[in-house]
Image (cartoon, helix red, strand yellow):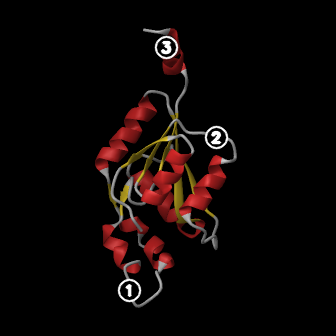
Amino acid sequence: MNEELYSQMRKKMFVVFDLDGTLALTAHRAHFLDRPSKEKDWRGFYAACDKDEPCHPIIRTLLALDATGAEIEIWSGRSDEVKDKTVAWLGEHGLSHITIRTRREGDHRPDTVLKTEWLDEGRKPALVFEDRASVVAMWRARGIVCCQVAPGDF
């Protein structure tokens, strides 16, 4: 094994996971956003988050990376308004030990802006799991490997 590869393998990896559409399946609440004649109801969309089904393959991937000693965080565009529901859901699915970042209540900026801001605080993940195409493009433009786990053109 060459020295550079060995050095990289010894480093603690920092990995970021998105939540909605990545760890949590949100199809049951899509009707809050698919409203052609009305504005998207983000408040309703997030309020129904406690009924999400888990995306087992992605949760298993998170837990496998966690078991290697990687540092894992969830960076979610969800509002702090539903932080209690979010923390409870994570606990129900074995993820209560994972740090989560959510947007401040009333912050309606695009996820690309929010996650870029968090990235600019200085923590650069080695790997990201995300569903939204625009956010995937942002990570990749910043030179970060991003696994797009589902189509997300919204």
State the residue lying farthest toward the right: 121
The label number, if any, that marks residue 36 in the structure image: 1
Residue drawn at the location 39% of the way across and 38% of the way down: 63
Tell me, yes or no, if residue 129 can be seen here: yes
Q: Position of residue 55 (x, y in %)?
A: 32, 53
Relative to 77, say whether 121 is above or below: above
Q: Position of residue 101 (x, y in %)?
A: 58, 54
All told, the count of numbered labels is 3
Marks 1 and 2 close (CB-CB < 8 Å): no
C-alpha separation, residue under disc 3 versus residue under disc 1: 53 Å
- Which structural element holds mark 1? loop
- Which structural element holds mark 2? loop
Quarter holding the C terminus is bottom left
Relative to 141, say whether 33 is above or below: below
Which amino acid is tagged 3?
Answer: Tyr
The label number, if any, that marks residue 123 in the structure image: 2
Disc with the residue nearer the chain's start (3 vs 2): 3
C-alpha separation, residue under disc 3 versus residue under disc 2: 22 Å
Specify few, some or many for label 1: CA neighbours under 10 Å numbering under 14, 14-19, or 20 or more: few
Specify few, some or many for label 3: CA neighbours under 10 Å numbering under 14, 14-19, or 20 or more: few
Residue depth check, mark 1 versus mark 2: number of the one nearer the observer:
1
Q: Nearer the viewer, residue 15 or 86?
A: 15
Specify few, some or many for label 2: CA neighbours under 10 Å numbering under 14, 14-19, or 20 or more: few
Residue drawn at the location 64% of the way across and 40% of the way down: 123
Q: Which residue is mark 3?
A: 6
Q: Position of residue 130 (x, y in %)?
A: 43, 51
